[in-house]
Amino acid sequence: MNDFSAQLATELQPASGTGPDWLNALRQAAAEQFRSHGLPTRKDEAWKYTGLGVLTQNEIRLSVPADTIIAPAASPAVARPVVAVEQQVTLLNGRILNRSENLPSGVALLALDEALDTEVDGLQALLESLPSAKKKTLSSTGFSALNTATLENGVVIRVASGVDGGRVLLSWSTSVEKAACLFNSRVCLILEPGAKLELLEQFETPRDNKNTSNIVVQAALGEGAALRHVRLQQESETTGLITRTEVSQQAGSDYRYYGFDFGGGLVRHDLHCMLLGSAAKASLNGAYLLDGNRHVDNHARVDHMAPDGFSEQYFRGVAGGSGKAVFNTAVYVHPGADGTEAKQSNANILLSKRAEIDTKPELEIYADEVVASHGATVGQLDEQAVFYLRSRGLNQEQARQILTTAFCRSVSDRLADPQLAEAISERMMDVMPQLD
Amino acid sequence: MSNETSTTDNLVKQKYQHGFVTDIESETLPPGLSEQVVRAISARKNEPEWLLEWRLKAYAQWLEMEQPDWAHLNIEAIDFQAISYYSAPKADKDRPQSLDEVDPKLLETYDKLGVPLHERARLAGVAVDAVFDSVSVGTTFKKELGKAGVIFCSFSEAVQDHPELVKKYLGTVVPQRDNFFAALNSAVFTDGSFVFIPKGVRCPMELSTYFRINAAETGQFERTLIVAEEGAYVSYLEGCTAPMRDENQLHAAVVELVTLEDASIKYSTVQNWYPGDENGVGGIYNFVTKRGDCRGARSRISWTQVETGSAITWKYPSCILRGDDSIGEFYSVALTNNFQQADTGTKMIHIGKNTRSKIISKGISAGHAQNAYRGLVRMTPRADNARNYTQCDSMLIGKKCGAHTFPYIEVRNPSAKVEHEATTSRIGEDQLFYCLQRGISEEDAVSMIVDGFCKQVFKELPMEFAVEAKALLEVSLEGAVG
């Protein structure tokens, strides 16, 4: 364990006392794991390409010096929503700042501590189900251990059977100045059989800050439930964002993820779908555009544990400046998951001499009657296409911008809502000029 | 398809054809590894002081290293103190000068293996440096090669006759502390092959070594070094079969290739060591470090391998593309059946400008076997306009096997292009059905489909090897379908 982990371990005070006994046991166990294994290092295979330099340089603290927190009232306006939404939850430093009250019937939206008090159905099972890494590589889930040990803040959304919960926006930002802090938060989504929900997450802090957010999203999809998960991340170049999304899917459920990383200093997202029931579907899509010194690491993994599942992974990335993009996809087809179809596609464009792209599309297959394929490329813009556009009177920069945008728009165009797709593409255009 | 099961069962249970033990008294060191053992090996081989020092340095480094566990392999702990590190046929001191003087029993061994040394060598125009256990016993065609200036001899001979060349190149591609098994090999390697092709020479024939593991509980630690000077060319074949035995035998070889400007080395392997029985008992543990260094501009290294044997295969023939415009290639067929496990692939490190590499990997998994492709393509910042194309396909036969792909792609140059594609599938029911309704038996149909699947790799093999490889695949695979 390195100095940084050791320092955090000494600061770590499990959020004990509040909540039921099982929760305190969970927190204690996680704290113990963290104290003995710490945070991941580059020696952990899953963190081979991602060091925590930004966090150590920022001198991240777990305990927050009281005088450095900006009172919510005085805090700068939080992010502008990418599209207008009816249901919105604004979170500051991992805690709910405000939330809309007009919820459709059959939808419960609670703060995590409230939910624990009222004993929401299925919440205990969900919280206890967060998988840990294998014994030898426990440090690779160090952030999750930290998150569980301090489990207190967050959001719980529960959609009753057959209800369409509509779109809920979670708007995340942080507000500490002078010092840099690590904020933990947990989102729990419980979709009963046949329920539907669209979760829109937006990460944006309107001014530069050195904080890091460590957020775990857990979703349990009942039979035939459908979750659409859109994530737009535009944090500043000094911000850390460590997130993990765990989705468990029952038969016939449908999970669709659309992630857009247009910012962040050190960004790591672990996205994991477990297809527990037959004929479940997971569609994971993402685009990442990196300029400056940004480091964005996406790890996506789908476990096919039942027959006739379908999964696809479609990711597009552009790295310019001194940006470093890491992408790791894995498909794991367990014994018995016959009839699985899995597709992975990852294409990247490297624009600058200082930028770097590391990609690793993995397949692990233990079942018969499986069709799995993956493709990964790293290259440049097609010079012929650039030439074509220039011959039409566009300058070099415009031509490149159009082509790069088109490359990434292939991801946003997959969104079912054209209005949202357009809004995200506009944000994409804001990043483009800096890429070279 | 169930009515085929009984025939297929018989074929699955087919015994390893090359399993037998030749009864030749071996002069074997007692099991165990220590500094004394390293010194004893070096002394027996009458090695110069610098080589002993080199070995001892490797041994010291090995002691500090841990056996790697990152591969997708389930390996029982290896007791390195239970292995004997040196075994030589007794006639060591007065080694035979020609094949006629070779122990007839030994020649018989090769006959049983289907490698009639004389005939094969003469008919095919192949020089064979046959390795029996750890000491080379016969080298043919030496004179003819000598005329061309080519040096092809056992490693021990090279140490005696060409120490300056060995000293210049040994360990420059795979340093002693490169990895756990390479360090072990560097400390205790017993013999192997040495090839040197001087400037401008195109080696007049294909060179070949037949490795053979024999005496019980003897690890094999081969060391091969091939150097092609400016503009030289050589094609080298390596093939092996091993006798049947129940203890796991350890093999940790190191192969180093060096190509200078405009030089080219083509290295082909057919590996058919004892894979263990149908219950996963026995079989060879095969941990190999193979690496080629394209030092000169426009040089080329091509690896082709057909891996059907060994209980465990841990092997990543790699290319360091240092010279501008140099080319690296890797063609592989890895077949695992029963309880075999393979974790194999390649590394292509692009350093020079305009370097190109191509990777074609075909994995076939049957029975309870696990077959993994693990590869790295790295484009360093200097590697302008570098290109890589990778294709790795896996085929699953049966419900209990696994096929895995772990490709690492690291790009740090904006003018480099990397393409990777992979597929995993089973033999298509419709393909089988099509063949069956044309009157082709299921066995033949499967072998035809598999042959087609592997064709891209087989066509890279030299003629004689391609035939052998195809037959080998059929034997190893037949009956795995049902």
Image: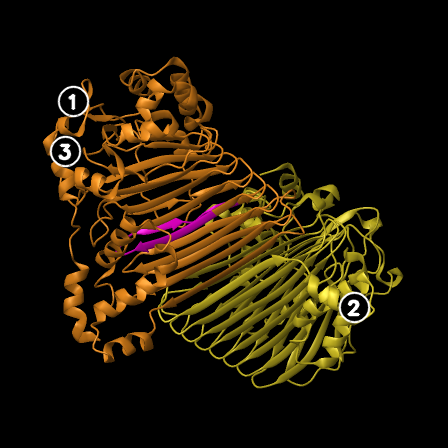
Sequence-first tag of 3 and 1: 1
Q: Can residue B276 be seen in this snapshot?
A: yes
Q: Residue at x 75, y 54 (%)?
A: A291
* Residue at the image point whose x is 67% and y is 63% from the top: A382
| In the foreground, A239 or B150 | B150
Q: Residues within 10 Å of mark 1 (few under 14, many from 20)?
A: some
Residue identifier under label 2: A391
Magenta span has A137? Answer: no
Give the camera-side residue of B440 and A219. Answer: B440
The verdict on residue B341 being magenta is yes
Image mark count = 3
Dot label at residue B106: 3
Per the rendering, the colour in which chain B appears is orange
Image location (x, y in percent) of residue A269: 63, 58
Disc 3 residue type?
Leu
Q: Chain of mark 3?
A: B
Magenta region:
B329-348
Report whether residue B482 is seen: no
Q: Position of residue B51 (x, y in %)?
A: 39, 18
